[in-house]
Amino acid sequence: MSKASTRDLRARAEAFWQERTEQERKLLRIGGIVVGLGLFYALLVDPALTGRDRLRKEVPELHQQAAELQAMAREAQTLQGQNNIAPTPMTRDSLNAGLAARGLNPQSLTITGEYAKAQFNGAQFAGVVAWLDAVRTESRISVVDASFTAQETPGVVNATVTLRQGAR
């Protein structure tokens, strides 16, 4: 705003004020004070009080959650240092039981120390993969080498799989 328009606005406000009676001026002053206090309360005081009350309720909950997280972190560190339970050793019987559960019959199954070699002819690919996944998760047996040859029938393969227990 320019100085001229500011002076003009001031002059109009002064003229408006002078036209009012003393009682009207008094009521306008009181009304202005009430409106100002209402705005002050609505814009500054109420949000501060509401926020303070909300924080008063949330801070104890946050402290509780922090304590629970710290306890879980300590427990995780403790568990990390513990030895894992050793899986059952790989045996011919355990491998045959897993194969039979999935309807698989290997042509040969040879176990030498911590290694095992299984050969399948005309086996369902999905069954072989399911069996390999099961021995991996249940007995921590991993596939060292695998060879699959597809047959003419869809989903049927010839496979040779070498397994090792304890390898990660």
Image (cartoon, helix red, strand yellow):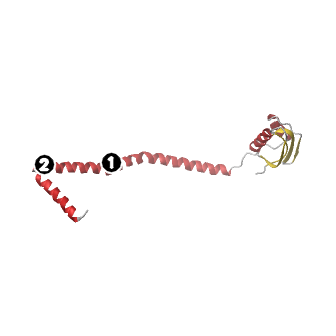
**What residue did someone put label 1 on?**
46
Residue 116: percent from left, percent from top: 85, 46
Q: Residues within 10 Å of mark 1 (few under 14, many from 20)?
A: few
Q: Amino acid at mark 1?
A: Asp
Q: Nearer the viewer, mark 1 or mark 2?
A: 2
Tell me: 91 left or right of 2. right
Q: Is residue 19 above or below residue 151?
A: below
Tell me: 102 left or right of 70. right
Answer yes or no: is residue 26 visible.
yes
Q: Nearer the viewer, residue 132 or 140?
A: 132
Q: Is residue 128 above or below residue 77?
A: above
Q: Nearer the viewer, residue 45 or 39?
A: 39
Tell me what residue is drawn at x 26 percent, y 48 percent.
38
Answer yes or no: is residue 87 visible.
no
Task: Find numbered disc 2 in the image and state the secondary structure of the residue it sits on.
Answer: helix
Task: Find numbered disc 1 in the image and state the secondary structure of the residue it sits on.
Answer: helix
Q: Amino acid at mark 2?
A: Glu
Quarter where residue 156 is shown: top right
Q: Nearer the viewer, residue 59 or 5?
A: 5
Q: Nearer the viewer, residue 156 or 4?
A: 4
Q: Which residue is outermost to the left? A: 21
Marks 1/2: CA–CA distance: 31 Å
Residue 134: percent from left, percent from top: 76, 41
Tell me what residue is drawn at x 16 percent, y 59 percent.
11
Residue 80: percent from left, percent from top: 66, 51
Q: Which mark is residue 81?
A: none
Looking at the figure, which quarter contains the N terminus?
A: bottom left
Q: Is residue 102 above or below residue 38?
A: above
Q: Earlier in the sequence, mark 1 or mark 2?
A: 2
Q: Which mark is residue 24?
A: 2
Residue 59: percent from left, percent from top: 45, 48
